Structures are given as structure tokens and as C-alpha cells.
Amino acid sequence: MFVAKSIAADHKDLIHDVSYDFHGRRMATCSSDQSVKVWDKGDDGEWHCTASWKTHSGSVWRVTWAHPEFGQVLASCSFDRTAAVWEEIVGESNDKQRGQSHWIKRTTLVDSRTSVTDVKFAPKHMGLMLTTCSADGVVRIYEAPDVMNLSQWSLQHEISCKLSCSCISWNPSSSRAHPPMIAVGSDDSNVTYSGKVQIYEYNENTRKYAKAETLMTVTDPVHDIAFAPNLGRSFHVLAIATKDVRIFKLIPLRRESANSSGPTKFEVQVMAQFDSHNSQVWRVSWNITSTLLASSGDDGCVRLWKANYMDNWKCTGILRGDGSPVNGSSGHTAALSTVGVPGAAQMVVGASSAGRKKAQLMPG
Amino acid sequence: MMEEVDVEPSPTLIPGAGFHQRHLGFEWGPGDLLVYETNYKLQGPKSAGSPFVHIVRKDEDICSPILRKLFNESHLIFVGLQKIKEDVPSKNKKTQFVSISKNYRSVIRACMEELQQNAVSAQEGTVASQYGDQVSILLAIELIWNLCEVLFIDASPAGSLLLHLLDWVRLHKSDVDSRAREVLQSESPTRHQAYWDVVISLVLQGRMDEARQVLSKQASLRAESSSVFRRMDLLLQNMPVFNPTGTQTLTEFDMKWRNWHEECDRSLQDNTFASNRHLETICKILVGDEDALLEQKELLSTWYHFLVTRLLFTHPSIKPPDLHYYAQSSMNMFLGPRASPEPLDIILLSAFEFDLHQVIKDCSIALNNWWFVAHLTDLLDHCKLLQSHNLHFGSNLREFLVLEYASGLFTHHSLWQLAVDYFDHCPEFGRVYLELQIERVPLDTERKAIKVLRICEDRQMSEQVRSICKIMAKRALRNNRLGSALSWSIRAKDAAFATLISERFLQDYSNKGFFTDLDLLDNLGPAMLLSDRLTFLGKYREFHRLYGENRFTEAARLLLSLMTAKIAPRSLWMTLLTDALPLLEQKEVIFSVDQTYELMSCLEELNSGTKEPKQTDQDDDIESTKTELLRLSLARNLAMAIVKEGTIET
């Protein structure tokens, strides 16, 4: 592997999330500087910032794209207790000339009483649905009934998870055999509450989400969670970032009777467990075909994991900062002029102060 | 079994990260990984900003334009191989497989030559060395492939086995030819400093006729020693060579060879060549003297050349199962006890041991290149070799490697099209991989979208077809290209969206007074039935066309039916009735008595309905004026129609 290009993101504070759009031609970045930036890949292969705007009144934790079937739509969530939906509109001609696009806020979702820690769109076969989770332990599922009018979102479901929620992941399977399913991770640090991963499943009859499984073996705080693409298999694969990287296999068990209305029961197996990050693991994510899992941890590394055809897992790549204090990059000297504004970090609500507030808000 | 060695890969360093903050964030892209400095703990020192997002790629050869040729041409061979029918007799199949293997190798060779030329002509040193690196990788690939062809695909039996191994060595140690040419073309070949090297090299490769030819230059010069040279010439000439197509049996050959070998041995014992140390060396080589062979290390250059030469002069009818013993000992003798073998040596050794799985495994690690292992494994799998070697996960291994290779191709902006065929030939996960990958292909232009769409349609990937059309429709609508948006939503069979766009069309019409995208609207055909509003749009446009062509009767009938058959939404009835006005005002009677009554009832039905509350007084006035005008027109037309119809009847 090699660094092919470095882009000066020019955020005034920590970047918390970077998100590619579905086709990989656009990306969005969000930061403690309360802004979101959108970047477009030009025909020359270079990335250009085409929009940058203040989105929240606190650190922006996550930013994510809706499927392009629904247009150019972003969702963001923040320490300011809200999530927001943004839509790009085809701008005035002089905007286009300047290479800028225009994003307008379609809605602010204000139901959470604490920091909104994650935001995810549901798989597209479910329609345009947005999910948030928050430090107060509630997962909320919103729906835009009219995909042409993104200013109307209705709160469809509220799932109370009892524990402070840090991350959510939808099962991407569109098979009729699999009802909609969402996994929720909790970063509650109290190890006496075991089962920091809960799995909820939609029930056609009650039209509600019900808990299907709690992964009791996960007792340490969970920071990220990711279902793998289903690949037409009967079972599900779930990666978890906790004090190590863990990959679970969830095998749905046969229902005793066809009309039993309870949630699916699963046989839970650990497929792999890696502790090479030495301590906490913060992010896990699968590539498109789930042949590679990437994880980021306290060792400062991103590690790539791959299973061979006999299901033996192996670390196949490591990325690590070179530890140099210079914000430099080889071959991109032009970009250097745009970074390093002194004092910029002090002017905005920094991630560090936001973090302290978060700590105070959270129940012990 | 065969546990992978757990070696931690060496880290790729991200510049300017890891000093201010302790974590690296990341995001998967279709072909790369985004990495940025961050801090997940949200405690500790304030941020100095994290100004860079780095794009990390796998070092893939995919970007090299010369290798692209390799990918393109091997793709054709691959597709051809998949078409070989099961019912071909296995004997014919073997020749087919060998020829396919040779085709693959000739593609590698062509690529190598082109790279070599580029390396020579490259101005910049680093570029030249890059080309050089790629050449050496391809060289190794071709070398391994060729050996696998001999050992596994052709699976030569004793006798022919050595002949094929000799060909293999000759092909990969071809500098002998150029040196021989150089010597023979010099003014005085015998005095050329490389003269004896050439003779010995030819002997080492078993090229006795050529060796004799070079040797004859010397013999003609030295009359006094000509008898010695004649003895050597005779030994070389008489060396038996197995002829696999002849009638001679292997036992007969063995007997003949043993006699010849004794003859050489005798010449050595009675000091026939003592007068000429070069000839004596050659004679020692002929009897297979290991020390004499090892003295020629420089000319042999590799342990596997040594192995083949050693077998040539000691065990010419070597059987495949015995190969591994000689291979191992030759390697040890040649490299010495303390030398550590290179990955290439280990791979070749595994091949000599007929350990296919080890060859494939080591190649995937050492070469960092899926092209080779995917194609070779696929070919070996077609030869049914993976089963016979007791790899019960054989087809999985093949599919695993082909999927890896094809996924790599998918990250390239044009090579992804080749990958489609590879996925098609992976029965277990090919389709699902293709579904996941193809929907991520950027739909930069309509042309590209249609190309992607066709691939999905050919494979009945209905969900992907729908999604692509939906994305294109949505994009076209955003950019106010209504025609394109409509045709994409028709392709997506998306009724709701077609309705929405039809409304836009009608709105557009009422603003501008004319329709755009006539080509599309005039040729909707049965697609019109996708949604009621679209049906109306198509029919309404048809009315305008008929009217424009002065086909008033047909136009009138259509207009009326739009209301009576409830195709037109109520909100548009007034517009339709207004459209009827010019027809009512024609000199000729167009609406019949019955039709006029029907128009009247439509107008009354419309007026009896509840008025929309939004309407202003001014709007109301316009509406009532219109109604009055229509009533008047309709009454006049009714009178004329009664008169006309009455006249005809009597």
C-alpha cells in the first residue's frame, strides 16, 4: 500500500468522520469545528471542496450519505443533541461557475436529550429511513414518507436500549427471509452491565422492533459495530470494535412454528478475535464485498484483516502515522500553504471541551 | 494442516500523522482507503486541527498501460477456457489445456518484451527501474508457469519429462544463443575468450549438435590433435536421446544410454582427453561428475539448471515421483548448506515436489499479484488437478482467487468490464460479488449508465437495473432534464416517479404552452400504461399532434375520451374543455350531438364539484367567463350538429 494523494481538508479542528458517497466520486468530512465539507472528484482525479458550511452548534460526530436513488442527501449528528438532513440543490449558474454547490437544511431532528452519537440511513429497500442513537440510550428511526419532500420526517420507532448508545449498524440483507435488523453498541464503561451489543428485529405483526439477541460475551465498552454485506448467505456476520476486534456469526435458528410471532433466535459464534491493537478499538468497517475488514485502535494503527478460502483470518496490512510533527506530505507542497492557521483551534468549540461536557452528561 | 505463517505485514506510514493525535480514522472507498488523523478519546490536549485526508491505495499493477494488455488478452484466453465442453474426450482436452497454457505464457512473454523495450528507452532512471522490476516479476511468473505446465498440465511421463525440462531450461537461459552467435561471427572464433564457455554451455543444455558445430572450428585448426577432437565429436554425436514419438521403448533407450555412458567413462579412465583440459572437462560433464558440474556454476547460473543438467547425464529417464529428491539435493549442493533460498527457489522446489497447493499459496504471497495465481489455478482446476491432489476445497480455492483478481479489476475505470466475465464464471459467489460491485460503478454519463445497465439486464439483475434507472432519473430531474428523467423512470418501471415527472411535464406545458421532448412523448407506446398520469400525458400529447395535423374528428374523439374514461385528472378538465373550444368554433361540425351532450355533462360535473378554497375572486371571474363561453359554444355546436345529422338522415 502507498499514500497516493493527500488532501488538505482545512478543517479548523479534529476531523471525526469522512464518508464516501455510494459511487466513490464524492466525500463528506465533518469536524469539531462544527462544519461539514463536501468534496467532489474532478475528471482530472483531483478532489475539490465544493461546499463547506456550519451544520451544528457542537462537534459533528458523524456524516453519512443517503443512497443516490434518493438524490444528493447527507445526514449529520452532533454533540448539540441534534441530527440534521441536508439536500444539495442545483444552484445558480454563478455558483456553478465558482465550482460551488448549495446544500440546504431539510430538517433538524431534535428528539434526543443528549449528544447524538451515530446516524445511519437504513438499507434502501426499506425506503428513505434514518436512524440515530444517542448517549441517553435511545435509538430513533425516522422516515420520510414522501421522498420528494425531505423536510417531513416522522419518528416511526423509539427503541430504548437502557445503556448509553455509541453506534448502530443495519443488516444490509434485502432477502425476504431476513426481517429488518439493527445492531446497537453501547460504550457504557460499567462492566457489571454485560451485553454491550443488542440486536433488534422488526416484527411484521406488531409493527415494532423487538430485541432478538444480546451478545452477553461483550462486556467492555463498544465503540463501533458493522454488519457485513450478506452475500446471499443464511447467516449474518457482525464486526465489533471493543477492547479488541471481534467478528461474530449470527445463525438464525428455525422457528418452532410458522405462526410464532416472537423475534428470531440466533446461534452466536465467534468467528475471529484480534487483540493486536493492544487496547481499545474505535472503528470497524467492511469493504464493499466484505473480503476485508479494517479496524482502528489505540496503537495508532489501521489494520486490515482478511479471511482466506479456509476462513483463516490474517492481518494483511497496517497503516500508521509516521509520527512527524510537520503537517507535510510528499508531492503535495502546494497544499501546505492552506494549513496551520495559528489559534484557529482556540476560536471554536474544540473536541476536547466537547468531550469533557459529554463525560459530565453521561450517567455513571 | 498448512497453517499460514503469521508474519505481521510491514506498516505503511502516513505522513504528518501520529504526532498531534493518537488515532487514525479511515473510510473504505470503492478502490482505496481514506485515512485521517483523529482522536477518539476526546480527552487530552486541544486539537491543532487535522488538516489532511490521505488516499491510500494498494500497489497494484493495474495502472500500468502495458500490463493492461496482459489483462485484456488473458481475459480472452480465460473466457475461451471456460467454454471447453465437459464432453470432449480427456485426451483431446489435455492438448487443449497445454495449448491454452502456452497461450497464457506467450501473452506474458509479449508483455515482457514490451516492458523491456520501454525500460531501455526510458529516460528517467526510476521509471526504467520500475519497468525492470516488472520484467523480473513477469520473468519469474513465466518460469513458474512453464514448469507447472511441464509437471502438472502436460504431466510428462519418464523419458519425455527430461526433454521438457531441458526445453524449460533452454528457454529461460537463452543468453547462450547470443553468446554463441557472437563467438561464431567473430573473426577468429577459436580465439574468442568465450569460445570454451559457449561449447560447455551448449553441452550443459544437451544441445550436442550445436556444440559439435562450434567444436569443429577448433578441430580443423589442430591437425595434430584431430583424433582427440574426433573422439569427442563421436561421443557427442552418439549420445542417445529419447524419442517419445518413436517405437523405441524406455528400456531400450536406457540400455543404449548406459552403453554410451560406459563409453564416456572409459574415455575418461584411459586419459583420452588428458592432452586438452577443456575436452577433459566436457567428458567429465558427460559422465555426470557432480564436482565437474558444480565447477560450471557460473555457466549454469541456477540450481534448477544444475538439476536438469545433472539428470541429463545421470538419470535421463527420471520418473516424476523421483524428481523431488534430486531437486532438493541439487538445490543444497548448488546453493551450499548455509545459503537461504529465495521465495522463487522455494516455489520451484514445491513444484518439483508436486505440491500444487504450496506453489499457489507461496505465489500469492511472494508475487503480490492475483493475475498469476488466479489464471494458473483456474487452468489447473479445469485440468481436474486440484481434486487429484487431494485438495477437497479445490473449487473454492479457484473461486477465491478468481474473485480476488476480478475485484481488483473492478477498481479500475475501464478494466472493470473484463471483471464481469470472471465473476460470471464463479458459481458460488460470482453473482453476488458482481451485484455489489457493479452498482458502485460511477454513472458519469448516460452512455456509461447504459453500458452498466445492459450488463445487469443480460443477467436478470432486476434490482440493480431498477436502482440504476432510478438514480439516473433522479439526477435528470434535478437537472431539469424532464425527457431523460421520464425515459429512465420508464426503464426503472417506477410508477410513482413517472407520475411525478408527468405532472412536471404538464406544468411545464401550462407555463410554456408547448411540449418539450416530443420524440419521447410521441413514442411512448405501451410504456404509457406505467402510470395513469403518464397515460394521460401521452394521450394528451397525441391530441395535440392530431389537432396539429388537422385530424379534427380524431382529435375531438380522443379529447372527449380523456374525460369520459376518467384518464384526465379532474384538475385538468377545464384545460381540456378549453382545448375543445377551437374545435367547436370550426366551420365544419366536429363534435356530434352525442359527443356534445357528453361535453356538456363534463362541464356541468366540473361546475357542480366543490370549488377549491384557494381561488381568488379574480380567478373565479376568469373561470366563470370560461364556463359561459364554453356553454355558448357548446349550445351553438349542438344546434349545428342536430341540423347536420338531421339533414343526412333525410
Image (cartoon, coloured by chain):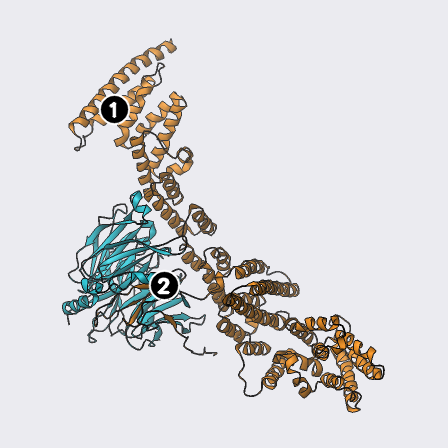
For this rendering, which residue is in front, A14 or A152?
A14
Question: How many labels sit on residues?
Answer: 2
- Residue type of the residue flagged with mark 2: Thr
User: Which residue is at a point 26% across and 27% down the rendered structure image?
Assistant: B574
Furthest residue in direction top, as rendered: B650
Q: Which mark is residue B642?
A: none
- Residue type of the residue flagged with mark 1: Leu
Q: CA distance from mark 2 to mark 1?
A: 74 Å
- The image shows residue A283, relative to residue B289, as above or below, that is above
Q: Position of residue B47 (x, y in %)?
A: 23, 68
Q: Colour of chain B?
A: orange
User: Which residue is at a point 34% across and 33% down the rendered structure image?
Assistant: B536
Q: Which mark is residue B603?
A: 1
Q: Position of residue B644 (x, y in %)?
A: 35, 12
Decide if residue A321 is in sight here.
yes
Furthest residue in direction bottom, as rendered: B270
Q: Position of residue A217 (x, y in %)?
A: 27, 74
Secondary structure beneath dot 2 equals: helix
Which of the chains is cyan? A
For this rendering, which residue is in front, B148 or B424?
B148
Q: Is residue A73 left or right of residue A24?
A: left
Question: Could you confirm whether marks 2 and 1 are on the same chain?
Answer: no
Secondary structure beneath dot 1 equals: helix
Provide the residue designation for mark 2.
Answer: A333
